[in-house]
Amino acid sequence: MESRTSVRVACPSCSAEVALDLPAVVDVERQPELAARVHDYTLPLVACPDCGASFRVESPFLYLDGRRGLVIEVVPSRDLGDWKGLEQRLVDFEARRPLPDAERFSTRRLVFGLRQLNEKIFVATNGLDDVRLELLKLALLSSRPELAQRLTGRFPELLLEGLVENDLVFLVLTRDEGGALKQAQLPIPRRLYDALERDSELAGGFAELQGARFVSWLRYVEMTPVGPAA
């Protein structure tokens, strides 16, 4: 499955109109070079032919990894505020046009931007459950008011970025009033994630996550998206 999306954008440095041919599908097994660009955050990085400046262009694409059973719709982070409508349209589209080899893809997700995509890939690669991970994030926000206070407003993110000994290491991303990105690491004991397998009360309170496409704690908070989070 291969396709491209043609777009025209203005260079942020010189305002020249740039014609781009971007991938609409990234298939890990057939396009390993594109998958590598997802992992190092260079997939939307392009160079202006007029001034040579490099800049990022966010464009929707479908990420397929048959080995891990992943099919992920990747949408620009600026569209996060419309997650409900996008999730419903994705469900409706899948009902009308089932994915070929659907039995290979047990995990179907909607994400906003490469950071969220790479988190889903990391979770699947390390044998973790993304629903339980998002429940852990919600439990942390409930028990740590100072964290909840930080993760409000302008495109907040709480992303799993590593496993170190007995800890899950999260990346906390926030933006100040001027839109400048701020980040910090937050290690959390792995045992808290493991304990959630037995916490039926918490899972029952967020039961819709189990069958959702947009599996994220961001379903439950108010925010003001402001451009790419990368």
Image (tube, rainbow, N blue to C red):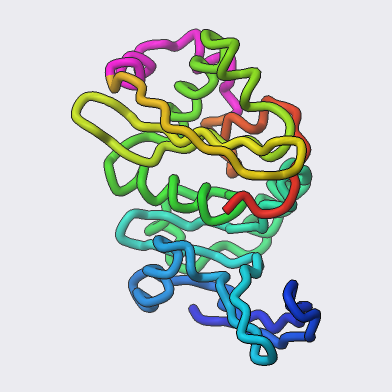
Q: Residue at x 57, y 53 (%)?
A: 230
Q: Residue at x 58, y 57 (%)?
A: 73
Tell me if residue 118 comes above or below residue 157 in the rendering: below
Camera-side residue of 96 and 122: 122
**Residue found at the very far bottom of the displayed protein:** 50
User: x and y percent of residue 182 in the render?
Assistant: 58, 38
Q: Residue at x 36, y 47 (%)?
A: 122
Q: Quadrant of residue 45?
A: bottom right
Camera-side residue of 166 and 207: 166
Position of 61 with respect to 87 (left or right) is left
The dominant secondary structure in magenta is helix
Residue 27 belongs to magenta span: no
User: x and y percent of residue 16 in the render?
Assistant: 78, 85
**Residue found at the very far left of the displayed protein:** 165
Position of 16 with respect to 29 (left or right) is right
Tell me if residue 101 comes above or below residue 21 in the rendering: above
Residue 196 belongs to magenta span: yes
User: x and y percent of residue 133 in the render?
Assistant: 43, 29
Q: Quadrant of residue 96?
A: bottom right
Q: Which residues are magenta?
A: 191-208
Tell me if residue 151 comes above or below residue 140 in the rendering: below
Camera-side residue of 11 and 201: 11
